[in-house]
Amino acid sequence: MRWYGLSCIAIVVVALSQSLVGDNKPVAEKSHEEHAAAQADHKAAHADHGEWELTIRTMRAEHLEALAVLKRLEAEILEHDAELELQLVHVLRHEQEMRAHADEIAAHEASGEGQEHDELEREHHALERAHKELGEALNKSMEHHQQYIREIRELGEKHRHDHD
């Protein structure tokens, strides 16, 4: 029994002195290899993090550029809205002029004076030209408006579908 106990102790001592592990490599050598592998993993991860940071910064810069474009677009829409408001003012003035002209025609018919007729006819032709110009300006604004709205809606729909 004593001999058996001493042999077990001897085996343990030999094993510890050689620092054997499951793959028969000394622990120090295995640790060095594992540390080197871990350091390589860390280096690769740091490289990934650097690339990811650049990607994120690039996307954020592109977001800022896109927001700037949207602000310019918003400014153009506001300018167009101001133009529409001015067109409405012109239309309302034109409407007032037409009503005043109609009142003048009615007064002319009631009085029957001939000289007023020529002046009323000139005013009428000027009002017709102004009416035509207002219609053309509104049609141009409407085309511009429809193009903008269509493009904005298409962008909104594309963005919505890209994220669904």
Image (cartoon, helix red, strand yellow):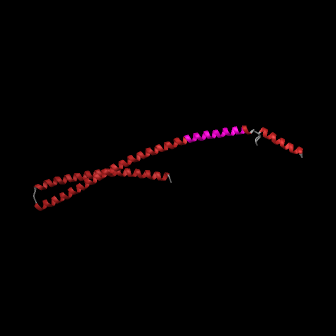
Q: Quadrant of residue 27?
A: top right
Pinpoint residue 31: horizontal percent, then vertical percent: 70, 39
Picture residue at 42% right of the left edge, 46% below the top: 67
Q: What's the magenta bit mostly, secondary-structure-wise? A: helix
70 is higher (above) or lower (below) than 106: above
Residue at image x 89%, y 45%?
2
Whether residue 81 appears in magenta in the rendering, the answer is: no
State the count of labels.
0
Judge by depth and name the residue closer to the eye, 18 or 87. 18
Q: Residue furthest front?
A: 2
Indicate left or right for 142 with 24 as reference. left
Percent of width and height locating residue 85? 29, 53
> 155 or 109, which lies in front?
155
Q: Percent position (x, y) of residue 37?
A: 66, 39
Magenta residues (range): 29-50
In the displayed orientation, state which residue is furthest to the bottom.
110
